[in-house]
Image: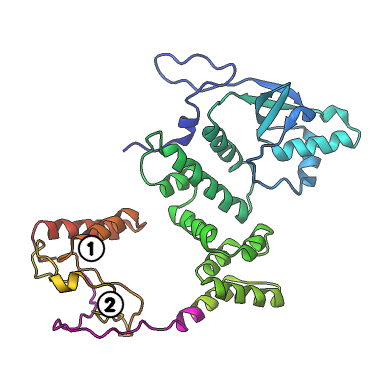
Amino acid sequence: MGKFNLNQLLNEKSMSGAEEETARPKKQVYKVVPLSVYDLEPSKDNFYSTEQIEELKMSIEMFGVKQNLTVKAIGGGKYRIIAGHRRRLAALALVEEGKPEFEYVPCGIETEEDAIKERLLLITTNSTARQLSDWEKMKQAEEMRALLEELKTREKLPGRLRDLIAETLNTSPAQIGRMEAISKNLTPEFKGELKEGRVNLSAAYELSGLPEEQQKEAFEEYKEKGAVSIKDAKAKKQEAKQTEEPPRRVPQDTTEPTQTHKPHSPSLSIPAAEKQPEAESKQGLYIKYDVFKVKDGTPVNNCFVLRPDKDRAARAALQAYAETTENEALRNDICEWLKRIEGGNDNV
């Protein structure tokens, strides 16, 4: 499988002034022209901060705009900004202070007609422009997933979306996973604090693992204290785990001995083709095994035991887990185990 290159995908269409592609792909070039800041309009898809431009304004006043803006013509002599919202605002502020020499800024004119690719271009050109806040990092990962999911319906993209997002944004798949957990599970109140920079990404991730009610309680405590640290968030998470009610034990008629989880690979003695007993296969979720931690023997609640030697659905679930986990060693072990089960070798 070839390595995914989003920039190559975005450059498939020529930009203004680009040479026609011949025998092999050539580096795309595009026209850079001076445009008035009054003819540049912000993109409605821009979620990056356009605040705190004083330092940038001072830099532009001293040295000029050293990096081109990227824009797209929208008719009537107007252009939509893809990258350079803060540069345009800084130059505009200088003009309105009575310094007309900053009205025209260098702009590269993009000709991409695909709406999805244009929005992806907005992210890729802004993601490395400056140091981003935790909120901006989370939002760009969120937006990129939505765009790639849409793009994947019509174009072949290799690998898992999380890996593609991580590679494009120059971070790890695990970090993208943490951002996705925050995006999906963090309450709006804490998201607001993350956006304002008063809660960092690590604390937000720990808080996102709490049930909504506990997050609300944590937010009330946060308002009283005026701060929340990752240590506080982890403590709250541990407290929530300790107060969880253990699962109700359901009476059952079974002669199968209690199963205790053991380290390393278990020994399977039942052929892979064997089916579950008829009565058992029709039951819902019920207590059949007791599971204990290897290191100290403490019971583990709220877990689900799979028997891939007996159950085809369990094998499918393990295969899906192997394809999803970030742990490469674990993925390889599971795949090897499943091969041996399918091959009828019970010595795993």
Q: Residue at x 78, y 30 (%)?
A: 37
Image coordinates of residue 175 in percent, x first then y, are 48, 56
Quadrant location of the C terminus? bottom left
- The picture quadrant where one finds residue 79 is top right
Tell me which colouring the rendered structure shows: rainbow
Q: Amino acid at mark 1?
A: Ala
- Taking the magenta stretch, the answer to whether it contains residue 21 is no
**Left or right: residue 125 compared with residue 244:** right
Q: Amino acid at mark 2?
A: Tyr
The boundaries of the magenta stretch are: 239-265
- Taking the magenta stretch, the answer to whether it contains residue 264 is yes
Image coordinates of residue 243 in percent, x first then y, are 47, 84
Image coordinates of residue 74 in percent, x first then y, are 67, 25
Q: Which residue is mark 1?
A: 314
Residues at circles 2 and 1 in contact by the CB criterion of under 8 Å? no
Which badge, 2 or 1, comes first in the chain's sequence? Answer: 2
Q: Residue at x 23, y 80 (%)?
A: 260
**Between 41 and 57, which is closer to the camera in this rendering?**
41
Q: Residue at x 12, y 65 (%)?
A: 275
- CA separation, marks 2 and 1? 16 Å
**Between 318 and 18, which is closer to the camera in this rendering?**
318
Is 298 placed above or below 53 here? below
Is 28 placed above or below 146 here? above
Q: Which residue is mark 2?
A: 286
**Between 221 and 329, which is closer to the camera in this rendering?**
221
Is 331 placed above or below 208 here? above
Task: Rate crowding at label 1 as few (under 14), some (14 to 19) or many (20 or more) other CA atoms within 10 Å.
Answer: some
**Left or right: residue 27 compared with residue 152:** right
